[in-house]
Amino acid sequence: MAGTLKLISGPAYLANAVADIYTPPASTIYTVIRHIHIANVVGSQVTFTLYKGATGGSTGGTELFKSYVVAAGSSYDYYCNMKMLSTDFLTGLASATSSLTITVIGEQHVV
């Protein structure tokens, strides 16, 4: 059964301190993240780190990307099939505030 295609998060700036990007909606819904788009909107390179884990999480070993460089005026696209349960949060940060925007697209399914 197909899920409902949704804009899961963003577009929004990544903060320079770890923050939730995706928060699970309910225990009766799971999400499959299909695409993460990160755009650098400034004139210098910026790095980002993304985690899958607890809310506000930045625990070592839960990194999806660690200090990944996005060149000035460039973007990065990650295509995936990442299932997110009601206990999974997507969190992250950038090396500089108001420099990277993140957009997350996926599907939501009722359990």
Image (tube, helix red, strand yellow):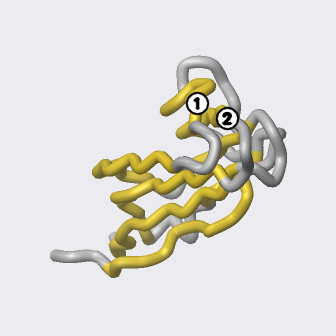
Where is residue 34, by image quadrant?
Answer: bottom left
In percent of width and height, residue 50 lies at 59, 38
- Say which element carries label 2: loop
Q: Is residue 30 left or right of residue 48?
A: left
As helix, strand or loop, the secondary structure at mark 1 comes to: strand
Q: Position of residue 14 (x, y in %)?
A: 72, 51
Residue furthest to the left in view is 1
Q: Nearer the viewer, mark 2 or mark 1?
A: 2
**Farthest residue in the front direction?**
43
Q: Using the numbered discs, state the Cα–Cα distance from disc 2 to disc 1 in whole angstroms.
A: 7 Å
Q: Kindly identify which numbered label has been placed on residue 69.
A: 1
**For residue 5, which quarter of the picture?**
bottom left
Asked whether, in this view, residue 29 is left or right of residue 9, the answer is left
Residue at point 81% right, 54% down? 98
Up the image or down, 11 lies above or below 75; here it is below
Q: Nearer the viewer, residue 64 or 27?
A: 64
Q: Amino acid at mark 1?
A: Val
Give coordinates of residue 94: x percent, y percent: 72, 39
Q: Position of 81 compared to 33: left or right?
A: left
- Identity of the residue drawn at 58% across and 25% down: 66
Q: Position of residue 25 (x, y in %)?
A: 57, 70
Residue name at image x 43 percent, y 66 percent = 105
Say left or right for 86 vs 77: right
Circle 2 residue: 45
Instruction: Point out the image quarter for the C terminus.
Output: bottom left
For label 1, count other residues whose C-alpha is less than 10 Å away and answer few (under 14), some (14-19) or many (20+): some
Mark 2 and 1 residues: CB-CB less than 8 Å, in contact? yes
What residue type is disc 2 on? Answer: Gln
Q: Is residue 71 above or below residue 32?
A: above
